[in-house]
Image (cartoon, rainbow, N blue to C red):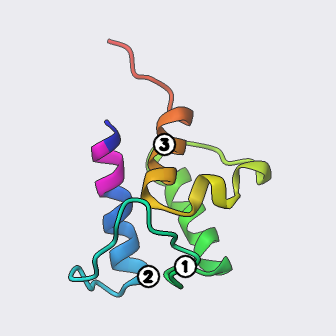
Amino acid sequence: MTQAIKEKVKTFIIENFLFGDSSYDLADTASLIENDIIDSTGVLELVAFIEDQFGIVMADADIVPANLDSLARISAFIEAKAVPVTA
């Protein structure tokens, strides 16, 4: 599931912050903040996307670089917070 989450988040970042430039080499561990891909407003957009797409309510304490500064961190955060679907 992590790969599917990562791809969905990556697509969102490319479309919204890189203006559709899919040629940008967005590494899984690259810092979105240090590489000037997102700023504080972008973080809020990312939070809204995560809440809408994955059904996660993010507390203020969750909105930190440790959770949101790279594709790998975002995916791990979502994976940890997502409610497992049982059959």
User: Real-space Cα distance between discs 1 and 3?
Assistant: 19 Å
Residue annotated with mark 1: 38
Return the disc, 2 or 3, that comes first in the chain's sequence. Answer: 2
Amino acid type at mark 2: Phe
Mark 1: few, some, or many residues within 10 Å (few <14, many ≥20)? many
| Sooner in the amino-acid sequence: mark 1 or mark 3 | 1
Query: Between residues 23 and 19, which one lies in front from this camera angle?
Result: 23
> What amino acid is labelled 1 in the image?
Ile
Q: Can residue 12 be seen in this view?
A: yes
Per the rendering, the mark at residue 79 is none
Residue depicted at 29% across the width and 56% down the height? 7
Q: Where is residue 53 in the image (x, y as percent from the top left)?
A: 44, 51
Q: Which sits in the foreground, 54 or 24? A: 24
Image-based side of 28 in relation to 48, left or right: left
Relative depth, front residue between 18 and 84 = 18
Q: What x and y, as percent, mark residue 85? A: 40, 22
Q: In percent of the image, x 28 and y 82: which residue is there? A: 24
Q: What stretch is highlighted in magenta?
A: 3-7
The residue type indicated by label 3 comes to Ala
Residue 59 position in % (x across, y down): 75, 48
| Residue marked by disc 3 | 76
* C-alpha span from label 2 to label 3: 21 Å
Element type where label 3 sits in the image: helix
Q: What residue sits right under mark 2 in the picture?
A: 17
Instruction: Work out which residue is located at the far top of the displayed protein and give it.
Output: 87
Identify the residue at horizontal 28%, vertical 45% (top origin): 3
Quadrant location of the N terminus in the rendered image: top left
